[in-house]
Image (cartoon, grey):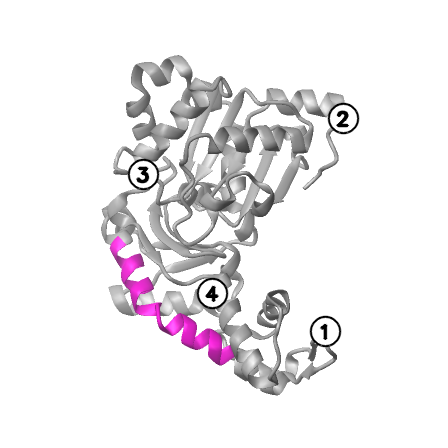
């Protein structure tokens, strides 16, 4: 994918500012953490990135030799900003300490980074949404991760659960229902649009929905398809709802301070969090499970929170002095520093 390069002044500023790479979703996000470059944010499809295979699927593994260096080289060429000296990488919440250590070694030994910060997606989402400590329910395109995150970038292994529920999965089920009802093939993009138009866990008034016209001219009546697609969404979430409530409860119980709050916070984020009624359903299920109310926050910037969290941390005055590590610091206390940056409890 070709991008229009930055002009020379902005390119130099970008090269001197920390780069933020988000590797935790179906889209490779790259931007520059400088106040005058807020618009310097690029959303590049994974199929254009050299590590597409590592991001594909529910596991979203990103720690293969050369992957990050190749990604940086590709992004530098695509943006025309030159190679960065300071790098923040937002990694999947399931990324283990060993993998993060390998990433740090790869970037330092290749000479690509002078300063580096590695942060888990759940923590980045919490920072990006401005919620502080919270159980993060990251309902993404390729899966749902539930874990506890604190302002200190803590993601504990005991608090994390991976659910087999995703936006792409729901789209596939809507597509199956469409094809069964209309008797002809339906493109994935069309199914995704129908899902956006009609999918809901909140019931709602079908009469208030807008008729949807398929590419072949077939009109989907709101009174029929709001019910059809709503039932698909209902069945899809119902299959994982008990596991989701248990996961949130375990994450809260793993952090005593979180449970001590009058209303523990649950952050609902990620592309699939737009599903109407999902926040209400999670709040009710968790309240039943733990016997008390929780406050479910659905961020308006849900799809960008991971990147924004990395951006905010990289733009602070503490980035160079406390948050990011240098190659010398990595060689002296690399494991210890990475453990401090992740709460020291990620295995």
Say which residue appears at 27% left-offset and 49% top-offset: 159
Tell me if 110 is positioned left or right of 340 in this view: right
Say which residue appears at 49% left-offset and 72% top-offset: 173
Say which residue appears at 41% left-offset and 35% top-offset: 64
* Picture quarter with the C terminus: top left
* Vertical placement of residue 196 versus 340, above or below: below
User: Where is residue 47 drawn, in percent x and y?
Assistant: 58, 47
Distance between the alpha carbons at the discs numbered 2 and 4: 41 Å
Q: Secondary structure at mark 4?
A: helix
Of label 4 and label 1, which has the lower sequence position? Answer: 4
Say which residue appears at 64% left-offset and 38% top-offset: 41
* Badge 1 density bin: few <14, some 14–19, many ≥20, Cα 10 Å: few
Q: Secondary structure at mark 1?
A: loop
| Residue position marked by numbered label 3 in the rendering | 96
* Vertical placement of residue 158 versus 36, above or below: below
* Badge 4 density bin: few <14, some 14–19, many ≥20, Cα 10 Å: some
Distance between the alpha carbons at the discs numbered 1 and 3: 45 Å
User: Where is residue 166 drawn, in percent x and y?
Assistant: 45, 61
Q: Nearer the viewer, mark 1 or mark 2?
A: 1
| Residue position marked by numbered label 1 in the rendering | 215
| Residue position marked by numbered label 2 in the rendering | 7
| Residue position marked by numbered label 4 in the rendering | 169
Tell me if 73 is positioned left or right of 328 in this view: right
Of label 1 and label 2, which has the lower sequence position? Answer: 2
């Amino acid at each position: 994918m070709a991008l229009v390069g930055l002009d020379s002044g902005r390119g130099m500023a970008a090269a001197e500012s920390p780069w933020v790479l988000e590797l935790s979703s179906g889209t490779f996000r790259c931007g520059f953490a400088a106040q005058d470059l807020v618009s310097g944010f690029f959303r590049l499809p994974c199929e254009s990135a050299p590590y597409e295979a590592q991001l594909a699927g529910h596991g979203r593994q990103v720690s293969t030799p050369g992957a990050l260096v190749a990604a940086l080289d590709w992004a530098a060429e695509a943006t025309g900003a030159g190679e960065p000296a300071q790098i923040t990488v937002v990694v999947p919440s399931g990324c283990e300490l060993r993998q993060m250590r390998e990433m740090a070694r790869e970037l330092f030994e290749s000479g690509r980074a002078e300063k580096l910060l590695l942060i888990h997606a759940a923590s980045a989402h919490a920072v990006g949404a401005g919620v502080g400590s919270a159980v993060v329910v990251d309902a993404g395109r390729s899966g749902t991760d539930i874990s506890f995150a604190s302002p200190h970038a803590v993601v504990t292994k005991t608090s994390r659960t991976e659910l087999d529920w995703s936006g792409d999965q729901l789209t596939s089920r809507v597509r199956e229902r469409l094809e069964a009802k209309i008797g002809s093939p339906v493109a994935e993009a069309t199914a995704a649009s129908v899902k956006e138009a009609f999918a809901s866990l909140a019931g709602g008034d079908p009469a208030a929905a807008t008729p949807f016209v398929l590419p072949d001219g077939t009109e989907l009546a709101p009174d029929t398809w709001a019910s059809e697609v709503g039932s698909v969404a209902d069945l899809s979430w119902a299959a994982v709802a008990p596991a989701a409530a248990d996961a949130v409860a375990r994450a809260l119980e793993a952090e005593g301070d979180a449970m001590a709050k009058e209303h523990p916070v649950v952050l609902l984020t990620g592309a699939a969090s737009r599903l109407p009624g999902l926040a209400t359903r999670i709040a009710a299920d968790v309240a039943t499970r733990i016997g008390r109310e929780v406050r479910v926050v659905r961020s308006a910037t849900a799809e960008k929170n991971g990147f924004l969290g990395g951006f905010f941390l990289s733009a602070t005055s503490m980035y160079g002095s406390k948050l990011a590590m240098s190659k010398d610091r990595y060689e002296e206390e690399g494991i210890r520093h990475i453990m401090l940056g992740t709460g020291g409890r990620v295995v």
